[in-house]
Amino acid sequence: MSISSASYVAARATPWQRAQDYLELTKPKIMLMELVTVAVASVVASGGAPQVWLVLHAVLGTLLVGAGACAWNQWLERHSDVLMARTADRPLPAGRLGSREAMLAASLASLSGVIYLGLLTNVLTAALGAASWVLYVGIYTPMKARSPFNTVVGAVAGALPILMGWTAVGGNLGLSAATLFLIVFLWQFPHFMSIAWIYRRQYAAAGLKMLSVVDPSGVRGGAQAVWGALALIPVSLLPALLGVAGPTYFLWALALGVGQLICAALFWLKMTDHSARILLRASLIYLPALLFWLMLGPRG
């Protein structure tokens, strides 16, 4: 779509439609998961009794930084997005938002979020927010067109918000915080590998070097999914051993971990879209369920 036709489409949109497009620019499903991890980490770090305003500031600041990062990601990928059916209807490739206005909104949100966190939580939380932005926008996004190792970088960026929630309420970056970081980091491998397999043809058409494109057999992607799910089991049990969570959490984490590992193993053995979707659903159940029981604390 040309710039003139894109401007025409944007000009004819109603205020409600434009608001929806701006919301879509922030990838709200991803943002919701990030904000949940921030809130849970804040509660756990404060022993179940956080200062409500600090949690709200952490969530709002993370929302701004994350929304800005997602919008920048879509701006940078607008030309490849138009080549994939799953992303062609996003606001930028579809021409419902102009390139300049999207870039401006993304920049304002990102900068405002870092400043907000620095002023209303602490400098460390703001620095972690800035680091997550740099990793996601400056490294992960361009790396997708160059190397399958982009997933590792993206997993680090995706796990940093849980540390932001931890530090926002004054938590120290010790073993407990590192454990939560590793849980979210490792979880992303079975989650992303299933998505990469389902949309492998679209990624290939867009020139993105996902592991499912570089290795069309799926062996390496399946192995990463299994490795991530397997490593998650002992890591996810650590909160109970560290006194952060209770015995019920231990059993729940073990059951969830084994269930996800079985789905990952089936995905690796079969390498079909159906097995990938089963693993994707399992991953979407795993993390929210685990975080819920983690939030119950040592008595949970």
Image (cartoon, grey):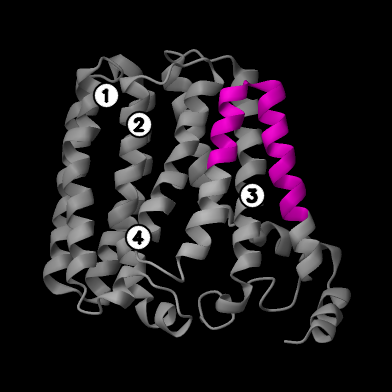
Which residue in the structure is indicated by mark 3? 67
Label 2 with label 1: CB-CB less than 8 Å: yes
Tell me, yes or no, if residue 140 can be seen here: yes
User: How far, Cα to Cα, is label 4 from label 3?
Assistant: 24 Å
Q: What is the span of residues highlighted in magenta in the rendered image?
A: 105-131
Query: Depth check: 60 or 156 in front?
Result: 156
Q: Position of residue 236 (x, y in %)?
A: 24, 34
**Callout 4, which amino acid?**
Phe
Q: Is residue 88 visible?
A: no
Q: Nearer the viewer, residue 44 or 299?
A: 44
Name which residue type carries label 2. Answer: Leu
Q: Which residue is mark 2?
A: 180
Residue type, label 3: Ala
Identified at 59% across, 81% down, the residue is 82
Asked whether the beta carbons under mark 4 and mark 3 sit within 8 Å of each other, the answer is no
Vertical placement of 178 versus 14: above or below?
above
Circles 4 and 2 in contact, beta carbons < 8 Å: no
What residue does disc 1 label?
239
Instruction: Tell me if 218 is positioned left or right of 78 in this view.
Output: left
Which residue lies at the image location 45% right of the left edge and 85% below the top edge? 205
Q: Is residue 237 above or below residue 43?
A: below
User: Label 4: which residue?
Assistant: 149
Q: CA distance from mark 1 to mark 3?
A: 30 Å
Compared to 226, does 286 lie above or below?
A: above
